């Protein structure tokens, strides 16, 4: 169940379709969308490394999941509001508008929050659930469910992306706040 919650917070959908996500918020120039995607990847690696090396033991499992869920929900609500108030222009411009840059910053912050909770903590949390004699079966089943939920969420996102982009951001935000405690 916890992998279901992880996948439906929407972060992996953003990871899989990063250039398209940045294009949908106003980075219509392909080069700028790819550069923003590369920065997103660097932010993800650095944020996860900092959390795993320095903060994982001091924050604790539930606190990091709680902080991650509440923070991600706030970022996605603000992103949806900005996307509705300042829709990206239809023509390709020299540089992204300030609203598009703010939305990109929210995506970067959302990734940082994912990296302190719902990203690495889910596997640690699942490994603590099962007793030693059945842990390998439990982790195998949990890992299989992770990829099942990943596929279902990303298939859903592809269908919703072009039609309901604002609704999708709100939906992911609601999933984050609804699933605060696993």
Image (cartoon, rainbow, N blue to C red):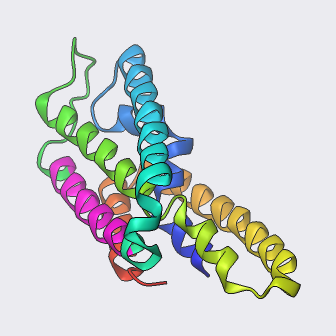
Placement of 46 over or under 91, stated as above or below: below
Looking at the picture, how far across and down is residue 56, in whole percent? 46, 62
Specify whether residue 82 is painted magenta: yes
Specify whether 91 is left or right of 50.
Answer: left
- Residue numbers of the magenta segment: 66-83
- Residue at horizontal 15%, vertical 27%? 97
Q: Specify the farthest residue to the top.
A: 94
Does 156 sit left or right of 21 as displayed? right
- The residue lying at 47 percent from left, 34 percent from top is 41
Instruction: Tell me residue 92's x, y (percent).
Output: 28, 18
Residue occupying image coordinates x 52% and y 51%: 13
Percent across and percent down for residue 54 are 42, 52
Is the N terminus in the top left, top right, bottom left or bottom right quadrant? bottom right
- Whether residue 146 sits left or right of residue 175 in the image: it is right
Q: How many numbered marks have been drawn onto this rendered protein structure?
A: 0
Quadrant hosting residue 153: bottom right
- Determine whether 170 is above or below 181 in the image: above
Out of 122 and 90, give the one closest to the viewer: 122
Magenta span: helix, strand or loop, mainly? helix
């Amino acid at each position: 169940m916890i992998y279901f919650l992880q996948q439906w917070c929407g972060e992996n959908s953003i990871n899989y379709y990063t250039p398209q996500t940045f294009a949908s918020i106003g980075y219509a120039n392909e080069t700028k969308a790819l550069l923003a995607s590369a920065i997103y990847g660097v932010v993800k690696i650095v944020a996860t490394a900092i959390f795993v090396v320095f903060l994982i033991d001091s924050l604790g499992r539930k606190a990091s999941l709680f902080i991650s869920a509440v923070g991600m929900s706030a970022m996605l609500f603000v992103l949806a509001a900005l996307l509705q108030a300042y829709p990206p222009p239809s023509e390709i411009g020299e540089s992204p508008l300030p609203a598009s840059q703010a939305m990109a910053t929210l995506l970067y912050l959302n990734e940082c929050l994912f990296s302190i909770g719902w990203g690495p903590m889910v596997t640690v949390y699942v490994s603590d659930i099962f007793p030693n004699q059945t842990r390998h079966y439990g982790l195998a089943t949990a890992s299989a469910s992770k990829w099942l939920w990943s596929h279902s969420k990303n298939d859903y996102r592809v269908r919703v992306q072009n039609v309901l982009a604002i609704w999708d951001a709100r939906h992911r935000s609601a999933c984050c706040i609804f699933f605060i405690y696993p």
